[in-house]
Amino acid sequence: MIKTVDLTKKYGDAFAIKSIDLDLEAGDLFGFIGPNGAGKTTTMRIIATLLEPSWGEAYVCGHSVHTHPKEIRRLVGYMPDFFGVYDDMTVVEYLEFFAAAYRISGKQREDRVSEMLDVVDLDFKRDAFANTLSRGQTQRLGLARTLLHDPQVLLLDEPLSGLDPRARIEMRNLLRKLGEMGKTIIVSSHILPELADVCNKVGIIDRGELKQNAKVTEIIKMVRQHTVLVIQTTNRDSLDQVARLLEGHEKVQGTEPGDDAIRVVLKAGVEEYSDLPRLLIENGIDLRRFSEEQLDLESAFMALTQGTSRRM
Ligand SMILES: Nc1ncnc2c1ncn2[C@@H]1O[C@H](COP(=O)(O)OP(=O)(O)OP(=O)(O)O)[C@@H](O)[C@H]1O
């Protein structure tokens, strides 16, 4: 549905993006993650045919941005990170204005606008002036505008930025809903955890280069080369004994005692460790907790964008 090959944009000697290869299938919800200035907007604007690449290709439904930009514009809805709303227009007038620009007329325009207000849950604000909306409501209005011509592909630039926690949840639910409607979506953010649970695929871009492009679960696996166990005992004093029993075990790389738990770092590649709790129990240890430490996505993101693996 969306494919880029060696997509590159240079400004003078500087690369805004460098050889980006993406391949998204219909229905994919792709989280495009990277810090400020990484190249997310540049990539999306090229796919939306608003910016020409220096070289390389981008295709939407098989149409090239070089040869078939008009066809692509019909298929794509692009929502920029910042957009203006007109002071003297109500929400309905604003959407009708853009529907007219898409040559949707008469009763069809009225129906389409009402339908979109419904999708983004903004019907209760239909007669409010657009410039009186909150940031979250403005983003939803922007999304309604992007959806007017029923695009199959959505390119949403940082739709969650600047939203309060509640508005974030609402926008995430809306993204899920659009995914269920069968849209193919690229949504950018500079925060991985913000999108991880809505997206099926994630790409991490840093300084114009795509560092990773995979499923969220795979990304976590790539960062975490070692399994880490967290062990607690009913009696705090027996943690030292746990350390003694596990240090030097063939599956254990090292132990890190803490105040009320001990972290046990397994050797690279060790995933099966059922003999370890058995060993502890056989030695009279009363276990309160024996679990794998979850790697948080924030750390995964930091590790991936800094090009270093998390120290274990
Ligand atoms: N018109 C331009 N002229 C020169 N450099 C530019 C231009 N547009 C973008 N750049 C540079 O290209 C790089 C990528 O910018 P881009 O806006 O794509 O990043 P981004 O990931 O969208 O960042 P943000 O999250 O801040 O919007 C940046 O270093 C930026 O300074």
Image (tube, rainbow, N blue to C red):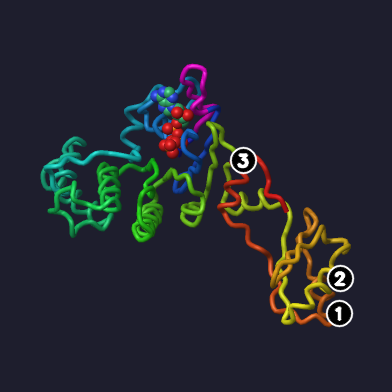
- The answer to whether 32 is drawn above or below residue 123 in the figure is above
Residue 287 is left or right of residue 203, and the answer is: right
Check contact, mark 2 vs mark 1: CB within 8 A. yes
Q: Is mark 2 within 8 Å of ligand 1?
A: no
Q: Position of residue 36 (x, y in %)?
A: 46, 38
Magenta-drawn segment: 4-17
Residue labelled with disc 2: 245
Look at the image and tell me whether residue 211 can be seen.
yes
Quadrant where the image shows the N terminus: top left
* Ligand 1 neighbours mark 3 (CB distance < 8 Å): no
| Along the viewing direction, whichever of 144 and 81 lies nearer the viewer | 81
The span from disc 3 to disc 1 (Cα, nearest Å) is: 42 Å
Counting residues from the start of the chain, the first of labels 2 and 3 encountered is 2
- Tell me the kind of residue under disc 2: Leu
Whether the magenta-drawn stretch holds residue 12 is answered as yes
Q: Residue at x 19, y 57 (%)?
A: 123
Q: Residues within 10 Å of mark 1 (few under 14, many from 20)?
A: few
Above or below: residue 55 compared with residue 158 = above
Q: Amino acid at mark 3?
A: Gln
The kind of residue on which mark 1 rests is: Asn
Q: Residue at x 31, y 39 (%)?
A: 82
Q: Position of residue 287 (x, y in %)?
A: 74, 79
Name the residue beneath numbered marker 3: 306
Q: CA distance from mark 2 to mark 3?
A: 36 Å
Q: Does residue 170 appear to the left or right of 280 in the view shown? A: left
Q: Main secondary structure of the magenta part?
A: strand
Question: Is residue 22 magenta-colored?
Answer: no
Q: Give the structural element (helix, strand or loop) at label 1.
A: loop
Q: Which residue is mark 1?
A: 283
Secondary structure beneath dot 3 equals helix
